Image (spheres, grey):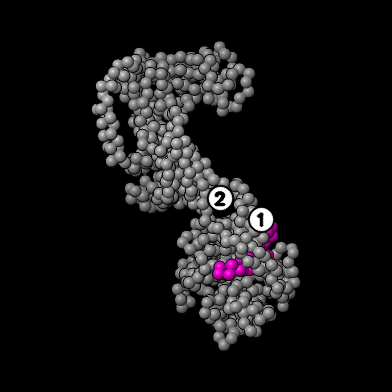
Amino acid sequence: MLKRLLLFMILVLGFVGLNAQEKRLVRADEEYSDYSFRPAIDIYQKVLEKGYVSPDLLKKLGNSYYFNADYEKANEIYRRLIEEYPDEMGTDYIFRYAQTLKTLGDYDGSKEMMAKFNDMASADSRMAAYEEDYLAKIEENSGRYEVEAFPYNSKHSDFATSFYKRGLIFSSDRDTGNLARYRHTWNSKDFLDLYKVDADSISENNVVKLEGDVNTRLHESTSVVTKDGSTMYFTRNNFLDGKKYKDQQGVTRLKIYTATFIDGEWTDITELPFNNDSYSIAHPVLSLDEKILYFVSDMPGSHGESDIFMTKIIGDGTYGPIINLGKNINTVARETFPFITAEGVLYFSSDGHPGLGGLDIFATKIAFSYDETVTNVGRPANSKYDDFAFIMDEETRKGYFSSNRPDGLGEDDIYAFTETDPLRLDCLQGVTGTVRDRISNEVLVGATVKIIDEENNEVSSTITDSEGDYVLELDCSKGNFVRALMEGYVPSEEYLPKSYGKPRIVDFYLERDVVTGGYGDDLAKLLQLSTIYFDLNKYNIRPDAEVEIQKVIVAMEKYPSLKIKVNSHTDSRGNDDYNMWLSQKRAESTVNYMISKGISAERLKGEGFGESRLVNECGNGVPCSREKHQLNRRSEFIILE
């Protein structure tokens, strides 16, 4: 920044030297002097030092320091903002404050702020996901699967397939009756067992119960077998060695067990060490390298009714820490039946993410993080009923899912499918807009616009075209900042939380880093003053107006020869004569305030114009909105000399 500034000064001085004589001749013909102002630092800092403060002032001053890499001063200002005006701290200011803390070595403070930032950003994005037309998004993903009935369904419940040898293992209550509400209570009189089909010569075209000690007189379901075929992880009620265990409420919870394949049978049943009698752990699935076990639980610390967790398989019956997959995947409702593909895509079912009804099937990449896009796979895999237990072979693009949709044979049925069009999980979203000068409204050609991620890394950038327009793409599965910069202007940025939907439009109106004014210019515009309000039918200076007027006072202190005229205007509501009187009193009140703060009366004039100089069509008898009327209630600080 400093090198660019020095280079800019050298170029400017060189230009001045070459054209000095010409400039002197031009200025000799001018009847006014020019004044240069730096609104964000020169003016605002002095106003703050005088003891006048507002959230708008702190935001602009903090941003000016931040974008100029003066993180120590930016930190001071942002700290005041969060201490004095906590409700004004949006996600973008929380983020910048966190970055300044990190730069100054306060890593604990930065971590605390980033946690707050993530909470706020997540809340924003969750709300945005529902506010957007999610049904249209689901329809975009629909039509990817050719679905057909599973030939081995029964009139009972059949669901939760897993790949095993050449065929499948699945859960069913076909030999023990019908389980209508297994996902809610798991306490029916009829029980689920594990079956295999087309896995070997015994089960060729036949549904056969698994051999050995896996099946009991309670429920067994959702299994996964290691690639070598030696170990199975499966779900069962809290039942071991012929004894059933209950929690304090008398409920028999779910647990994950392992079984070993010995001499053609599944035996040596072992309970996982992190099971608990007080809550359920179920639905195991392995990562491609079989070093991570994913599962579902309602253990303490869950975000909702059931969450998806993971743990590393260390070996010898030991496991690593239990990790929740986070709020991007887990919601306040149910997330269940996970499945991991060879390409690192997690499929799971949820009734917490936007869907068609009941449990829907979703997909997300988790190969590198758990903060990727969560995508509804669409129809026909999903319906307005419960759709769950999705598995797929990515080489053949064939797989299975379960559903209780009414056109099935039983209470729950297995459906086979072929994926004809791969699901796109990358979340690319277009961002377009125009960059303009805030004062003149002219488009800024050649301005730089960047995408900055939440780690403050530059992702991409472009420059505005001849119309001041830009086009960029961002990863909409994550929060991003869009930042506009141009030499001679204060950078500006906007935070975009993760959001899946239509392209975003972000327009920028940049403030000049140095603004030059002369005779007839409105100092209020040059200094970007906020509207100076008066109470209804009153003309005394309010505390919030003091902050804005102090900016003008600082400018006049900086330039002792500067003289201005205060023009006060009203809207058209009320009697014309009364409005003229009221505006005159407000102009005089403003002038008198400035005199009381040390500005010579000889440098000030004041005049009220009532409703005689409206900036829009909102005259007498013309119906206008409150916002349009407000544009006419303005104060101007016109430079006289």
Q: Residue at left 68%, top 79%?
A: 205
Q: Is residue 13 above or below residue 464?
A: above
Secondary structure type for disc 2:
loop
Res. 303 image quadrant: bottom right
Residue that carries the numbered disc 1 in the rendered image = 356
Query: In percent of the image, x 47 and y 46: which residue is there?
Result: 472
Q: Closest to the observer: 584 or 413? A: 413
Residue 43 makes an appearance in the image? no
Depth order, front residue of 465/313: 465
In magenta, the rendered stretch is: 383-403
The residue lying at 43 percent from left, 15 percent from top is 606
Q: Main secondary structure of the magenta part?
A: strand
Q: Is residue 201 above or below residue 383?
A: below
Q: Say whether residue 479 is left or right of residue 409.
A: left
Q: Which mark is residue 500?
A: 2
Q: Position of residue 446 (x, y in %)?
A: 40, 38
Amino acid type at mark 2: Tyr
Query: Can you tell which quarter of the image residue 407 is in?
Result: bottom right
Q: Is residue 635 above or below residue 178?
A: above
**In the rendered view, would you say 11 is above or below 459?**
above
Query: Quadrant location of the C terminus?
Result: top left
